[in-house]
């Protein structure tokens, strides 16, 4: 983790007084204040540390999303270049042979296409691959064309693009798996952060109410006491700034909700 941990149990503890403290109830109030202040400081540290952690996780999640998105664009670029090579091969075949007529005759006879699963609605990439398979079937029947340098150059380019697409899809699928894992894991830590913030407020409200009901806090001694003395029997949250961290968590939760709508699916091979 890149953030600095908030230390636990940081607020000074106050000492009880002698006989006067026992008589006025001051000692009991100080004991109760010290007990709840310690728990409150620790609850604050736990909540803040968890919020810092999810901040780091949120940055990692965004980075992983952008990485996966970039790989998806790479795949699209490779497929576009492959489609251009398909066109170049088709144009060359059409120029030197009667390929177009034979290709459609073959397609109409229902020749099995190896690299594509036939679906109700074809994507452009499916049509391209079907056309490529037809061209390859034709070249198998007439190997004298495939041996020509003009054909070989295009076929080598297509093979290169096929390798790049397979490699990019593997990297993309790995990136998607990691992104989806981070997304799932992130939700759990968001919930933990919420729980820790709620625990902090629960401790504060409970401690404040108990202190307000102590004999000393309801006595004339408290009303006449100095601000310094009063502070010794009150919970100190001045440095906690929990509202600030709560707002940070709300921003992260909003971004998380947007990420949940950005789930990726692994690509087919």
Image (cartoon, rainbow, N blue to C red):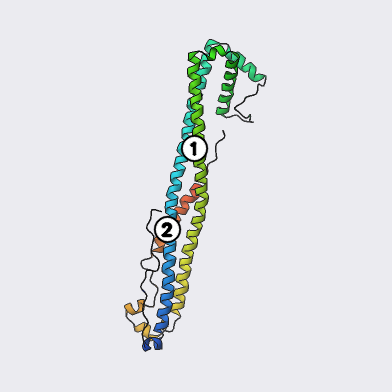
Q: What element carries label 1?
A: helix
Label 1 neighbour load within 10 Å: few <14, some 14-19, many 20+: some
Q: In this view, does 214 lie above or below 252?
A: below
Between 34 and 145, the one lying in front of the other is: 145
Q: Is residue 164 above or below residue 20?
A: above
Q: In this view, does 258 lie above or below 269?
A: below
Percent coordinates x, y for residue 58 in the rendering? 44, 50
Q: In which quarter of the image is residue 208?
A: bottom left
Instruction: Identify the residue under disc 1.
Output: 171
Percent coordinates x, y for residue 203 in the rendering? 47, 70
Instruction: Identify the residue under disc 2.
Output: 247
Percent coordinates x, y for residue 189 in the rendering? 49, 56
52 to the left or right of 267? left
Label 2 neighbour load within 10 Å: few <14, some 14-19, many 20+: few
Q: In which quarter of the image is residue 47?
A: bottom left
Is any part of residue 175 visible from this angle? Answer: yes
Q: How many marks?
A: 2
Between 217 and 80, the one lying in front of the other is: 80
Which quadrant is home to the C terminus?
Answer: top right
Q: Image point 48% across, 14% down: which residue?
A: 150
Q: Image point 47% across, 36% down: which residue?
A: 71
The Cα–Cα distance between marks 2 and 1, rounded to whole angstroms, is 36 Å
Q: Is mark 2 on a helix, strand or loop?
A: helix
Which quadrant is home to the N terminus?
Answer: bottom left
Percent coordinates x, y for residue 219 in the rendering? 40, 85
79 to the left or right of 2? right
- Give the mark, 2 or 1, whose residue is nearer the N terminus: 1
The reply to whether dot 2 and dot 1 touch (C-beta < 8 Å) is: no
């Amino acid at each position: 983790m890149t953030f600095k941990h908030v230390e636990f149990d940081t607020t000074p503890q106050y000492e009880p007084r002698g006989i006067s403290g026992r008589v006025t109830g001051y000692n009991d109030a100080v004991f109760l204040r010290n007990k709840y202040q310690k728990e409150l400081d620790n609850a604050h540290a736990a909540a803040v540390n968890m919020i810092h952690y999810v901040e780091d996780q949120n940055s990692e999640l965004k980075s992983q999303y952008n990485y996966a998105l970039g790989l998806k664009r790479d795949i699209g670029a490779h497929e576009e270049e492959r489609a251009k090579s398909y066109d170049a091969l088709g144009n060359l075949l059409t120029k030197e042979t009667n390929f177009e007529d034979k290709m459609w005759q073959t397609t109409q006879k229902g020749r099995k296409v190896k690299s594509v699963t036939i679906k109700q609605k074809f994507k452009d990439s499916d049509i391209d691959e079907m056309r490529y398979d037809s061209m390859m079937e034709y070249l198998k029947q007439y190997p004298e064309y495939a041996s020509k340098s003009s054909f070989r150059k295009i076929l080598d380019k297509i093979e290169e693009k096929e390798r790049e697409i397979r490699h990019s899809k593997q990297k993309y699928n790995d990136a998607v798996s990691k992104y989806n894992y981070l997304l799932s894991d992130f939700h759990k830590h968001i919930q933990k952060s919420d729980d820790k913030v709620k625990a902090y407020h629960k401790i504060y409200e409970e401690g404040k109410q108990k202190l307000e009901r102590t004999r000393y806090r309801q006595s004339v001694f408290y009303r006449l006491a100095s601000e310094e003395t009063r502070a010794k029997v009150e919970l100190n949250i001045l440095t906690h700034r929990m509202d600030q961290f709560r707002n940070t968590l709300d921003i992260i939760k909003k971004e998380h909700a947007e990420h949940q709508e950005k789930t990726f699916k692994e690509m087919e091979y």
